[in-house]
Image (cartoon, grey):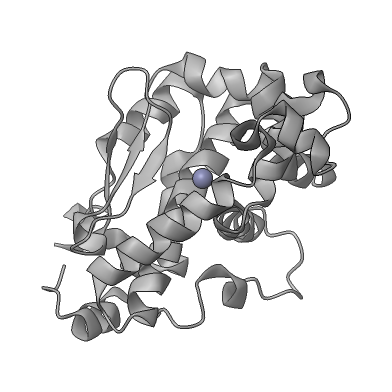
Amino acid sequence: MLLRRRTPNVPPVLEKIDNAIGSNTIVAYKRALELAPHLAAVSIGTTNRGQEAHFRGHVRGLRRSTVALPVRAAYYENFIKDAYTITRMAPFETFYKERGVPVTAGTMADAIVLHELGHADRFAGLVTANYGDSKRAHREGTEAYRQQRATLPTAMGVAEAQAHGLIDKPSDIWLKSAEAYAQLTEEKGADDFALSALATLYNIDSHVTMFPAIAQPNVPRSYPEYARIMGLPPL
Ligand SMILES: [Zn+2]
């Protein structure tokens, strides 16, 4: 019966987060899946104690990959309290402020969920670019990300970061690293996915089609298509 039909599989963790801090992560998640249906293959769960929100790509592909999210409100509240995370999340703060959307733990949680899904979308793109060889995609992605993080001032240390002109004084290192982190190819890519999805949610400029910016150009637009290419079972 149509009336009894419910929207498919909203991850319980998102409901918990939304209840805890008044975010709209379920709406954000559903929109991400509309824009990039292959993301339905990714499991969404909770982090272990003390862990940050993260995406973990799996050598066997997207269906084994996970996005893990903390449920506790304090984690998301920190994104509007702590100088490092505020600096890291500056692209989202700018986005929200430009549109008159309040910058709260809730709107930051929406951004974080979409950001992690952005990493998943990038991993999907890498698998496709490697003709479905997810093991190779995983290795490539991990290595590229390792190299990117090595360029952060915190990874170099004060002396080297100063020698490279990345920081003026030692006390700059932390916030300069937060800024640089947001600009790493992998992080910025995930941010761009999130910002594009948010832009469609807030329906800012109907003349701008955000959709093409959402997924990597080489990623199929639907899970069935993706599953066929990847030899995965249907959902
Ligand atoms: Zn990230």
228 in relation to 106, above or below:
below
When asked about the image quadrant of residue 152, the answer is top right
Q: Nearer the viewer, residue 57 or 4?
A: 57
At a point 68% along the width and 25% down the height, the residue shown is: 84
Seen as rendered, the residue at the extreme right is 168
Q: In the rendered view, does 1 fall on the left or right side of 88?
A: left
Instruction: Please tell me whether residue 127 is drawn above or below residue 197 in the rendered image.
Output: below
**Quadrant location of the C terminus?**
bottom left
Residue situated furthest left in the rendering: 233
Q: Horizontal and vertical percent for residue 10?
A: 28, 46
Tell me the residue at 73%/45% (across/down): 91
**Residue 79 percent location from the top left of the image:** 61, 25
Q: Residue at x 31, y 18 (%)?
A: 49
In this orientation, does residue 115 appear? yes
Residue drawn at x 41%, y 43% as measured from the top left:
26
Residue 130 falls in which quadrant of the image? bottom left
- State the image coordinates of residue 108 (x, y, percent, origin top left): 59, 34
Is residue 174 shown above or below 112? above
User: Quadrant of the image for the N terminus?
Assistant: bottom left
Q: Is residue 211 above or below residue 109?
A: below
Q: Nearer the viewer, residue 226 or 163?
A: 163
Provide residue 184's location: percent of width, then percent of height: 63, 52
Q: In this rendering, does residue 166 appear at all?
A: no
Q: Nearer the viewer, residue 146 or 34?
A: 146
Left/right placement of residue 4 relative to residue 192 reads: left
**In the visual, does 120 lie left or right of 167?**
left
Foreground of the two, 20 or 113: 113
